[in-house]
Image (cartoon, helix red, strand yellow):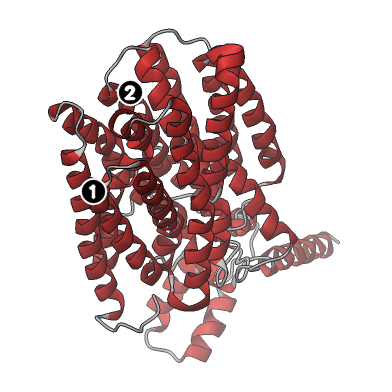
């Protein structure tokens, strides 16, 4: 009777174990029995594969003392099987995928929209706070720096499965920082709230959102990123218009509170509907140093460092240039910022459509860099209002193309999508330092020339063309010097 009961118990446990093992990959089951395999190999020597497998099965422990060790390992694998689950290829469309696009658009609307529209704050703060253009640009530069730099940690946290917690914290910090900015009266208060606090919050939501989005698309990835990246253009239009219209009527404090309310309303849906698709990768470093052994990735990171050194100089200073050099009114100088951001919508969509349809992201990024660099040098010859509007249109289009293609070009160099978050975060950290220093360097060069923009324009143009040279070498490490190769 005792033997029968024990046998029945063993059969029930065996069936439970069989069901648990069926839920995990075969490769993981092999790891459970790795100890038994090693023992079998030591005793049987060079036996055949068939005999070796039979030996393993015969050595599975049947007494109740050793069984808990196997069950413990098996249940551990069952608990973590979601981390090993393969979600399959990206859906490349469908309701959930395009919903992520719409929500990520609003994320970029509330992060890069502020950055692209910072020119209106640059003009206002220079007069209201009585500080130099270089001092004011440190507010916007610090915001960009932290937006990028925090991406290293938020990207890794996303890979580890903490997307929702990181994203929620970032959204709360952004909303809090805007309302705190509405109370600021001094330069350092503004620097801490809008520069540091908002930069941290933006960094916590930007990189995780883009890393999440890239896992939903393959063939249409550049188009999806272009649609989301156009959020920086729509935000760069909406926020300057709000400041322009509300500031004279209700003052700076209430203008910022209105902006804070809009930010809260547009970010809230993301908390409920942004959904991580790739299973978490719990272990791993914040930096994947192995990536720097890949010449294509390393050169691309250097190219983007140089590119972002120059990229935002025009966004920050075109309004001041129009007002102080060309003689435009305050309203017309803000219109220049709006023009740059309006054409940026098309500048994001068209190059990314070409990238998906024909060329590939890096091939599309190269001509955008060429024209942006040439336009920055052409800025030197701008002496009249029509020329300045033409500069704003051309530069706004191709600078937007660079912003939109930058993430998808990086993703094209990453074969393992589970590492897209950490690699994107690493690259953001690298370009954060150039984004931090580029505009203040330009401001110092303007001050060095007593308000003349020549040195700043030369610095911006040279940086952009150096970026082009390194980008070409990065491409050559992938496909050589074949002109028609898609990459």
- Identify the residue shown where x is 35% and y is 29%: 323
Q: Residues within 10 Å of mark 2 (few under 14, many from 20)?
A: many
Residue, disc 2: 136
The image shows residue 264, relative to residue 417, as above or below, that is above
Of 128 and 273, the residue lying toward us: 128
**Residue 424 x, y percent position in the rendering:** 41, 53
Kindly indicate whether the residue at mark 2 contacts the one at mark 1 (C-beta within 8 angstroms).
no
- Identify the residue shown where x is 56% and y is 36%: 110
Of 283 and 13, the residue lying toward us: 283
Q: Quadrant of residue 309?
A: top left
Q: Quadrant of the C terminus?
A: bottom left
Task: Identify the element where label 1 is drawn.
Answer: helix
Q: Earlier in the sequence, mark 1 or mark 2?
A: 2
Of 134 and 12, the residue lying toward us: 134
Q: Point out which mark residue 353 bears.
A: none
**Residue 366 x, y percent position in the rendering:** 33, 66
The image shows residue 340, relative to residue 37, as above or below, that is above
* Residue 280 visible in this rendered orientation of the protein: no
Q: How far apart are the alpha carbons under marks 1 and 2?
A: 26 Å
Looking at the rendered image, the disc whose residue lies closer to the viewer, 1 or 2, is: 1
**Residue 293 x, y percent position in the rendering:** 24, 63
Residue, disc 1: 381
Name the side, left or right, on which 435 lies relative to 330. Answer: left
Name the side, left or right, on which 150 lies relative to 277. Answer: left
């Amino acid at each position: 009777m005792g033997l029968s009961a024990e046998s029945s118990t063993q059969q029930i446990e065996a069936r439970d174990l069989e069901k648990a093992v069926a839920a995990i990959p075969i490769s993981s089951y092999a790891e459970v029995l790795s100890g038994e395999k090693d023992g079998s190999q030591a005793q049987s020597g060079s036996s055949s594969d068939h005999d070796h497998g039979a030996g393993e099965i015969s050595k599975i422990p049947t007494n109740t003392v050793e069984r808990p060790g196997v069950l413990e390992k098996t249940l551990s694998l069952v608990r973590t099987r979601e981390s090993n689950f393969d979600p399959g290829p990206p859906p490349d469309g469908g309701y959930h995928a395009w919903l992520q696009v719409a929500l990520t658009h609003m994320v970029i609307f509330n992060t890069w929209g502020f950055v692209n529209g910072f020119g209106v704050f640059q003009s206002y703060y220079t007069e209201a706070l009585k500080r130099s253009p270089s001092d004011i640009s440190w507010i916007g530069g610090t915001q960009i720096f932290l937006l990028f730099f925090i991406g290293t940690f938020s990207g890794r946290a996303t890979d580890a499965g903490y997307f929702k917690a990181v994203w929620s914290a970032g959204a709360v910090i952004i909303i809090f920082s805007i309302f705190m900015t509405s109370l600021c009266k001094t330069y350092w208060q503004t620097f801490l709230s809008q520069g540091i606090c908002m930069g941290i919050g933006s960094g916590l939501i930007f990189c995780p959102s883009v890393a999440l989005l890239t896992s939903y698309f393959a063939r249409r990835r550049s188009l999806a990123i272009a649609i989301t990246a156009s959020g920086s253009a729509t935000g760069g239009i909406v926020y300057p218009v709000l400041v322009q219209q509300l500031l004279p009527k209700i003052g700076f404090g209430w203008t910022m509170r209105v902006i804070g309310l809009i930010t809260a309303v547009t970010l809230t849906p993301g908390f409920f509907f942004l959904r991580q698709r790739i299973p978490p990768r719990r272990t791993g470093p914040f930096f994947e140093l192995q990536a720097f052994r890949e010449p294509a990735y390393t050169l691309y990171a250097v190219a983007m460092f140089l590119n972002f050194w120059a990229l935002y100089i025009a966004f920050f200073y075109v309004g001041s240039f129009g007002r102080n050099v060309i003689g435009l009114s305050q309203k017309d100088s803000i219109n220049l910022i709006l023009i740059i951001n309006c054409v940026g919508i098309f500048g994001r969509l068209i190059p990314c459509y070409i990238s998906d349809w024909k060329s590939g992201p890096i091939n599309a990024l190269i001509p955008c860099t060429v024209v942006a660099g040439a336009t920055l040098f052409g800025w030197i010859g701008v002496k009249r209002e029509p020329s300045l509007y033409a500069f704003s249109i051309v530069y706004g289009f191709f600078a937007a193309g660079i912003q939109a293609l930058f993430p998808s070009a990086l993703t094209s160099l990453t074969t393992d999508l589970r590492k897209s978050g950490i690699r994107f975060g690493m690259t953001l950290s690298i370009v954060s330092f150039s984004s931090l220093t580029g505009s203040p360097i330009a401001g110092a060069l303007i001050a060095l020339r007593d308000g003349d923009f020549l040195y700043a324009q030369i610095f911006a143009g040279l940086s952009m063309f150096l970026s082009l040279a390194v980008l070409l070498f990065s491409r050559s490490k992938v496909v050589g010097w074949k002109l028609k190769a898609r990459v």
